[in-house]
């Protein structure tokens, strides 16, 4: 792809705009297609949420170099932005830069991609044909061609359903008016929907515990507000995190606050609750589920489903894509992020080699690259697109080079209360079979490993 001149980038979020900045630095022409009417459309949906990582890990180097030419006032590196602060102080100034703004097309939803003159079955000469990208805007269907594509469209608009088996719960579509997905702003613009109500939150990740923590705050000001935590697993402590052991301090603090709320009884816990059906009962919602021994139900006013996200792959059907069958991420990336096997939240840096597909010139990046895995860090996405832009430009040495040092999470997921000896020692540098650098060093010394991936 050394002769590629035009690079289509799907998505104008942080990773998509960073990709455009790197593509510009390489002397290539970006075309950024954003489904929303503004850049950072998905991030605006959770603009009230504070990030766990400070500014220093949330701005891309190429984007910073571009912004520096405008006299951009960079935020303090150790401060923690909200999603909306990221949009207003970083993404909007970046998108407005005279070098980048002409290349961004908002309200442009990609609907299909193929090779010009080639369907999925045809091989001979395929790699030389340009990509044909179809998208929809206010003027109807449009077509643009490109030499390479970076899909950084994210997963925000494809939330996982409430059903415990990966399918929608029976009745989920019929009761959609009483269900929200992700992280609604329960203390802000969505307050009226939840104040004084019984609200169930389904999920065990940081989105779930953050929302439950906000609901507990709302309950102090709005009598009658009752948060209920619907937990599919049997051990609530697994969601509490590592507290002071977590090197992402804000995330550790959230876990500590949430732990105290649960222990104080401010949040009702329903563990081993696997949702199977949802039924409207007048103004209320009956959440039916199963446990190991019996049928369960919770009667609530509102349900918030915070069970993660999955990639939208429909518009890629005519491309030759190879994904891990479980995680729906690039096959080479799967061993690094599989939550079934990988106990540590930190993932070693990776780039074009792990993200490239059988379709030459096509790459996944950002949250979309992680498929269904929940461990994505924004700075990882920036390293991805730096490497990808180098690969498209034909600079193999730069594409293979690692230019990122990740913050250690300091916590292994499989231990409900990790001691210092059970904490990961940072991301493995080269051994994809090692869960962390300590595990890697131990194996290089002929040992079985450091033990941080073992169960408590």
Image (tube, rainbow, N blue to C red):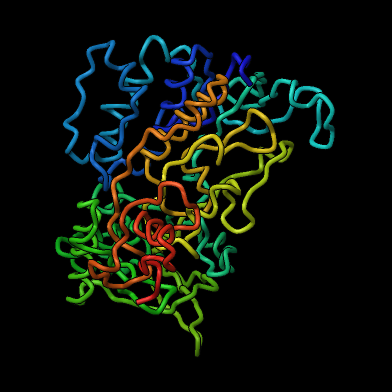
Please give the count of numbered marks on the rendered protein.
0
For residue 38, say whether it is visible: no
Q: In the figure, 217 relative to 54: above or below?
A: below
State left or right for residue 85 relative to residue 348: left
Comparing 380 with 190, the one in front is 380
- Residue at the image position 38 percent from the left and 9 percent from the top: 98
Comparing 314 with 403, the one in front is 403
Q: In the figure, 7 relative to 122: above or below?
A: above
Comparing 272 with 361, the one in front is 361
Q: Quick one: which residue is furthest to the bottom in this view?
A: 293
- Residue 276 percent location from the top left of the image: 54, 73
Q: In the figure, 428 relative to 398: above or below?
A: below
State left or right for residue 346 relative to residue 226: right
- Residue 99 percent location from the top left of the image: 41, 10
Position of the C terminus, as image quadrant, is bottom left
Q: Quick one: which residue is furthest to the front in this view?
A: 445
- Residue 33 percent location from the top left of the image: 53, 25
State left or right for residue 75 relative to residue 103: left
State left or right for residue 91 relative to residue 246: right
Q: In the figure, 365 relative to 67: above or below?
A: below
- Residue at the image position 52 percent from the left and 43 percent from the top: 369
- Residue at the image position 31 percent from the left and 31 percent from the top: 59
For residue 245, say whether it is visible: yes
- Residue at the image position 37 percent from the left and 61 percent from the top: 205
Comparing 161 with 253, the one in front is 253
Position of the N terminus, as image quadrant, is top right
- Residue 206 percent location from the top left of the image: 33, 58
């Amino acid at each position: 792809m050394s002769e590629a001149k035009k690079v289509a980038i799907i998505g104008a979020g942080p990773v998509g705009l960073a990709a455009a900045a790197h593509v510009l630095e390489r002397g290539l022409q970006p075309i950024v297609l954003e489904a929303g009417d503004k850049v950072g459309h998905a991030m605006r949906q959770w603009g009230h949420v504070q990030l766990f990582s400070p500014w220093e890990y949330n701005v891309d180097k190429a984007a910073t170099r571009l912004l520096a030419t405008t006299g951009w006032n960079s935020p303090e590196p150790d401060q923690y932005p909200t999603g909306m602060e990221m949009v207003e102080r970083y993404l909007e100034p970046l998108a407005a830069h005279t070098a980048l703004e002409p290349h961004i097309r908002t309200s442009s939803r990609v609907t299909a991609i193929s090779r010009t003159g080639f369907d999925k079955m045809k091989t001979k000469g395929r790699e030389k044909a340009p990509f044909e990208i179809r998208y929809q805007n206010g003027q109807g269907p449009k077509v643009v061609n490109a030499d390479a594509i970076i899909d950084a469209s994210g997963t925000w608009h494809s939330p996982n359903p409430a059903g415990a088996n990966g399918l929608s719960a029976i009745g989920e579509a019929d009761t959609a008016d009483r269900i929200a997905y992700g992280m609604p702003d329960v203390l802000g613009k969505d307050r009226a929907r939840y104040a004084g109500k019984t609200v169930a939150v389904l999920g065990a990740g940081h989105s779930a515990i953050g929302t439950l923590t906000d609901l507990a705050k709302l309950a102090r000001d709005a009598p009658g507000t009752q948060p209920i935590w619907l937990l599919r697993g049997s051990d609530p402590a697994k969601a509490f995190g590592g507290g002071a052991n977590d090197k992402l301090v804000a995330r550790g603090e959230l876990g500590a606050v949430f732990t105290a709320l649960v222990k104080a009884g401010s949040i009702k816990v329903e563990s081993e609750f696997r949702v199977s059906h949802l039924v409207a009962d007048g103004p209320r919602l009956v959440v039916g589920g199963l446990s190991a021994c019996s049928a369960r139900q919770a009667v609530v006013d509102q349900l918030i489903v915070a069970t993660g996200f999955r990639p939208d792959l429909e518009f890629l059907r005519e491309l030759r894509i190879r994904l891990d069958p479980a995680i729906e991420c690039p096959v080479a990336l799967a061993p690094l992020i599989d939550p079934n096997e990988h106990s540590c939240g930190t993932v070693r840096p990776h780039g074009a080699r792990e993200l490239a597909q059988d379709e030459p010139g096509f790459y996944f990046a950002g949250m979309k690259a992680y498929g269904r895995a929940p461990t994505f860090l924004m700075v990882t996405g920036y390293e991805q697109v730096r490497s990808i832009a180098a690969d498209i430009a034909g600079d193999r040495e730069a594409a293979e080079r690692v230019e990122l040092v990740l913050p250690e999470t300091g916590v292994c997921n499989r231990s409900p209360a990790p001691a210092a000896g059970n904490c990961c020692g940072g991301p493995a540098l080269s051994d994809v079979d090692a869960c962390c650098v300590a595990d890697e060093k131990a194996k290089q010394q002929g040992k079985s490993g450091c033990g941080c991936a073992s169960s408590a």
